[in-house]
Structure formats: structure tokens, C-alpha cells
Image (spheres, grey):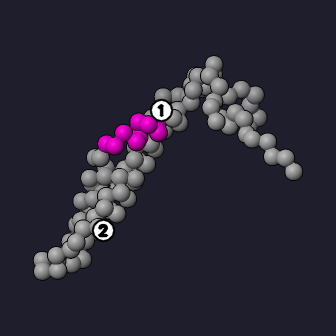
């Protein structure tokens, strides 16, 4: 059984041409930008949460469950403001190319 690799994976079903940037509205690009920023925020949150697990906890002055909740909320807020550059990189890779360029696989 031969399985051919997918070419032009950016072609929509029933369309003969690759999707071009002329077909995309600024609203679509804004949604893509927002999704990329959300992904970056989630990535930063997971990274900070795992980094926090490596810290040694002081049992003498442990805040218990309240400290854990506050620490988690603080990590979430820090992740929202963290600018790692990942969102820009994802956006540049995912935004549609012009129709004159062939998608690279």
C-alpha cells in the first residue's frame, strides 16, 4: 500500500488554489494573534508551575493551602504578562502566505 505525502496542506476542501492572505480578513488575523498569545500564556504558566515545584518549601513558615492558592494565582498572572516571543513566532508561522509562495513542508 502506497501512501503519498500530503502536498499543499493549506488547500481547503473543494478549492483548487491555496488559501491566500487576500481571503483572510483582519478579524481572522486578530483571532489567530489572540490564539497565539493564549498559547504563549498557557505555555508560560505550565513552565512556571513546574519550576515552582522544584523549590524547597520551608516547613517552619508554610502557608498551607492558602499559600498554594495564592502562589498559583500569582503564577497565572505572571504567565499572562510574560512575553517570551513564542506568540510572535507562532503567528508568523501560522498566518497564511501569499498565493505566489508555495507552502513548505
Left or right: where 96 falls relative to 51:
right
Distance Cα–Cα, label 1 vs label 2: 33 Å
Residue 9 percent location from the top left of the image: 68, 37
Q: Earlier in the sequence, mark 1 or mark 2?
A: 2
Q: Which mark is residue 57?
A: none
Q: Find residue 59 and report its horizontal and vertical position in percent.
A: 17, 80
**87 drawn magenta:** yes
Residue at image mark 2: 53
The kind of secondary structure element at disc 1 is helix
Image disc number at residue 92: 1
Residue drawn 29% across the image and 67% down it: 54
Q: Is residue 14 left or right of residue 33?
A: right
Residue at 28% of width from left, 46% of height from top?
A: 81
Local crowd size for mark 1, using a 10 Å CA cut-off: few (<14), some (14–19), many (≥20) = few
User: How many residues crowd mark 2 within 10 Å: few (<14), some (14–19), many (20+)?
Assistant: few
- Most extreme residue toward the bottom is 60
Nearest to the eye among marks 1 and 2: give it.
Answer: 2
Residue 70: quadrant of the picture: bottom left
Which region of the structure is painted magenta? 83-91
Residue in the picture at 12% in, 80% down: 60
Amino acid at each position: 500500500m502506497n501512501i503519498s505525502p500530503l502536498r499543499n496542506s493549506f488547500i481547503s476542501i473543494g478549492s483548487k488554489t491555496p488559501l491566500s492572505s487576500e481571503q483572510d480578513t483582519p478579524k481572522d488575523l486578530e483571532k489567530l494573534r489572540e490564539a497565539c498569545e493564549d498559547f504563549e500564556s498557557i505555555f508560560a504558566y505550565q513552565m512556571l508551575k513546574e519550576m515552582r515545584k522544584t523549590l524547597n518549601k520551608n516547613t517552619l513558615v508554610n502557608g498551607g493551602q492558602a499559600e498554594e492558592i495564592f502562589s498559583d494565582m500569582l503564577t497565572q498572572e505572571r504567565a499572562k504578562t510574560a512575553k517570551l516571543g513564542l506568540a510572535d513566532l507562532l503567528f508568523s508561522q501560522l498566518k497564511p502566505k501569499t498565493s505566489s509562495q508555495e507552502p513548505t513542508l
